Image (spheres, rainbow, N blue to C red):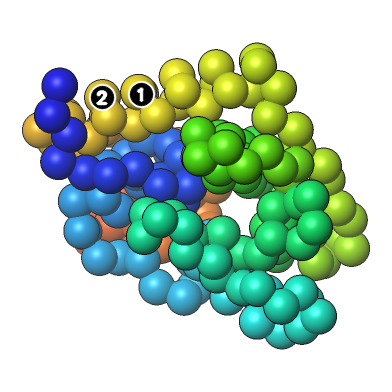
Amino acid sequence: MQHVHSVGGVDLSYYVLCKRKLWLYKKGIGMEDQSDRVLQGKLLHESAYPRIEKKELLIDDSFVIDAIDGEYVREIKLSSKMPESDKMQLLFYLYQLSLRGINKKGLISYTKEKRTVEVILTEENKMKVKKAINEVYQVLNQPSPPVVTKVPYCKSCAYYSFCYVKEADEYDA
Ligand code: SF4
């Protein structure tokens, strides 16, 4: 099968959060801005962890990780509100590294809670990542976006007004 899009860690995290968000984001529907929680997190490491030197590491021109620190790949997040999507994103990076013969463990640091979570690429997690990547392609191959499904994340999502514009119109009328 031919795939037009390449898939990255952020796509995998969006896949976990909301398949509609994933679709809209990948089709270039540009509602994302810096008020978005995921992007806010991306900017954080700039100030949060100045001692980790290698930031925004680009591997094989295909994906970006926050930092490699000894045996760990590190991701830095604002808060632990989206642990499953954070974990999937990091598992994706660990998986991609393992395909290149580099075996690392992962650490997610949550700045608000000052808490760090270890993520290991077990065989089971490897299967999870592979399955998620396949499903991301399935979502992206759909001709129109998946329907709006209310999830807790909606209120923090940059697409909120886009998805709920109808409700807002009705409210205004
Ligand atoms: S507002 Fe909700 S339904 Fe719409 S893209 Fe964001 S998370 Fe998905």
- The quarter of the rendered structure image containing the C terminus is bottom left
Residue that extends furthest to the right in the rendered view of this protein = 114
Q: Hey, what amino acid is under mark 2? A: Gln
Coordinates of residue 159 in the picture (x, y in percent): 35, 57
Which residue bears the numbered disc 1?
135
Q: Do the residues labelled 1 and 2 touch (CB within 8 Å)?
A: yes
Vertical side of 49 occupied by 133: above or below: above
Q: How crowded is mark 1: few (under 14 residues within 10 Å), some or many (20 or more)?
A: some
Q: Is residue 27 left or right of residue 137?
A: left
Q: In this view, does 101 lie to the left or right of 103?
A: left
Q: Which residue is drawn at 46% across and 75% down?
A: 34
Note whether residue 19 is visible. yes
Q: Hey, what amino acid is under mark 1? A: Glu
Which residue bears the numbered disc 2?
138
Q: Is residue 99 left or right of residue 31?
A: right
Foreground residue among 24 and 156: 24
Foreground residue among 104 and 82: 104
Element under label 2? helix
Vertical side of 49 occupied by 41: above or below: above
Coordinates of residue 72 in the picture (x, y in percent): 76, 51
Residue 29, picture quadrant:
bottom left
Coordinates of residue 61 in the picture (x, y in percent): 36, 60
Note whether residue 108 is visible. no
